[in-house]
Image (cartoon, rainbow, N blue to C red):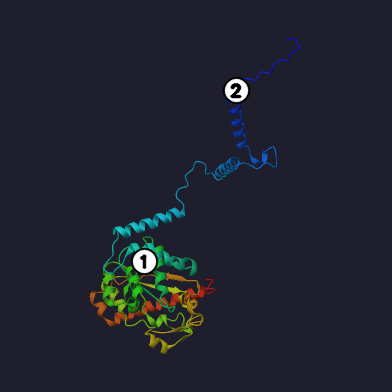
């Protein structure tokens, strides 16, 4: 009709699904946009937008490092965890062997040697030479100088042989009885492959084809005054030479520089030593005045040199019982070690810097 306004028609079925789809697409597009491209600088980026940026940065970093799609393999932490798990598995299952002396090779390589390597590499910074003079197989008797109040030199020599020998051979130390009388230390020494410094054990180790180390100076070397450093003490009656002659094993002189400076011994309180049942009671610049701190060895620079082997093949069976032969060989070994010590000291600029 004329004059009448047309009624406003409201559609009953709008295309709401299409509008909703458009809104969702716009939201996804906004989520993919970098927060710096937002129209309103004051608008805060959503969590989805931030996550998208983080993924983008990670993708660019992987590409830059050449790691996209490349498996880097297990990291150091996972390797250590795997090693610990393997160690525990073997200990729990009993999948390891112990020899007649109590040597537990598995425990030595998993626990003792790694602990000593910290001192060997980072504290004493030991240099090793002449390792080629040690046989690849079979027995040999290593004869070394002894010093430093505590027998650190023997432990460092064992690490030097194991880690530098092409066949990673174990060095079996002949130690003083006192070591094995101590409750914990004695068991640890046995499990690390060491035994008492007696003729019977020396013969058994050499007969079994082991690399065996002896320190003929004994307590006289360990407990000597600092003013007598690098002056070899008496080598005893040559029992180590007789053992080598019996086994027809070569004798390898070993000279160790650096051990004298770890605990510079200024005096020996003999009365305290007798009361405590010790061979000596050392007084050093830090012990006993500094208390437990005085037990920390000074970080001297070490050098261990294995000399040319002295063959025993040319001697007959009766040579081991001949005091003249054993004396001559003992004197030869002692003189070789002493002269080598002088040479190493002449080439050393500083006890702590090398």
User: Alpha carbon of mark 1 to alpha carbon of mark 2: how far?
Assistant: 92 Å
In the picture, measured across the screen, residue 47 lies left or right of residue 178, that is right
Residue 298 on image: x %, y %: 50, 75
Quarter of the figure with residue 147: bottom left
Q: Residues within 10 Å of mark 1 (few under 14, many from 20)?
A: many
Q: Is residue 164 visible?
A: no
Residue lying at the far top of the rendered structure: 1
Residue 96 on image: x %, y %: 30, 60
Residue carrying label 2 = 15
Residue lying at the far right of the rendered structure: 3
Q: Are marks 1 and 2 in contact (CB under 8 Å)?
A: no
Q: Is residue 158 visible?
A: yes
Q: Residue at x 43, y 84 (%)?
A: 281
Q: For this rendering, which residue is in front, 5 or 179?
A: 5
Kindly report which numbered mark, 1 or 2, lies closer to the viewer in this rendering: 2
Q: For this rendering, which residue is in front, 38 or 11?
A: 11
Q: For this rendering, which residue is in front, 196 or 249?
A: 196
Q: Does residue 112 lie above or below 345 as drawn?
A: above
Quadrant location of the N terminus? Answer: top right
Q: Does residue 139 lie above or below 150 as drawn?
A: above
Residue 176 on image: x %, y %: 34, 78
Element assignment for label 2: loop
Residue 57 on image: x %, y %: 59, 43
Residue carrying label 1 = 134
Q: Residues within 10 Å of mark 2 (few under 14, many from 20)?
A: few
Quarter of the figure with residue 323: bottom left
What is the tally of numbered marks visible in this picture? 2
Q: Residue at x 60, y 22 (%)?
A: 15
Numbered label attached to residue 301 = none
Element assignment for label 1: loop
Q: Does residue 7 lie above or below 67 as drawn?
A: above
Of callouts 1 and 2, the N-terminal one: 2
């Amino acid at each position: 009709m004329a004059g009448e306004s047309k009624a406003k028609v409201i559609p009953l079925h709008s295309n709401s699904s299409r509008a909703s789809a458009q809104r969702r697409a716009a939201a996804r597009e906004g989520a993919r946009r970098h927060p710096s491209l937002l129209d309103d600088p004051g608008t805060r980026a959503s969590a989805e937008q931030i996550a998208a940026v983080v993924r983008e940065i990670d993708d660019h970093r992987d590409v830059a490092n050449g790691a996209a799609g490349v498996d880097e393999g297990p990291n150091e932490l996972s390797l250590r965890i795997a090693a610990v798990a393997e160690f525990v598995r073997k200990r729990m299952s009993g999948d390891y062997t112990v020899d007649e002396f109590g040597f537990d090779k598995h425990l030595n390589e998993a626990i003792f040697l790694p602990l000593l390597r910290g001192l060997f590499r980072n504290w004493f910074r030991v240099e090793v030479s002449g390792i080629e003079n040690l046989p690849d197989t079979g027995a040999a008797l290593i004869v070394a100088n002894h010093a430093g109040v505590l027998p650190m030199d023997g432990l460092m020599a064992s690490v030097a042989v194991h880690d530098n020998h092409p066949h990673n051979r174990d060095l079996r130390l002949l130690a003083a009885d006192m070591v094995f009388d101590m409750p914990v230390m004695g068991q640890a020494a046995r499990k690390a492959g060491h035994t008492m410094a007696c003729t019977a054990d020396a013969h058994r180790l050499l007969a079994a084809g082991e690399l065996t180390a002896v320190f003929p100076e004994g307590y006289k070397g360990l407990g000597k005054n600092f003013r007598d450093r690098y002056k070899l003490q008496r080598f005893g009656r040559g029992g180590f030479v007789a053992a080598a002659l019996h086994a027809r094993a070569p004798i390898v002189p070993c000279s160790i520089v650096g051990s004298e400076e770890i605990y510079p011994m200024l005096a020996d309180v003999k009365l305290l030593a007798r009361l405590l049942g010790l061979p000596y009671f050392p007084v050093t610049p830090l012990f006993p005045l500094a208390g437990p701190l005085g037990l920390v060895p000074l970080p001297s620079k070490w050098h261990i040199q294995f000399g040319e082997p002295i063959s025993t093949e040319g001697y007959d069976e009766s040579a081991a019982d001949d005091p003249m032969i054993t004396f001559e060989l003992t004197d030869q070994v002692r003189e070789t070690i002493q002269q080598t010590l002088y040479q190493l000291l002449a080439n050393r600029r500083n006890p702590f810097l090398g």
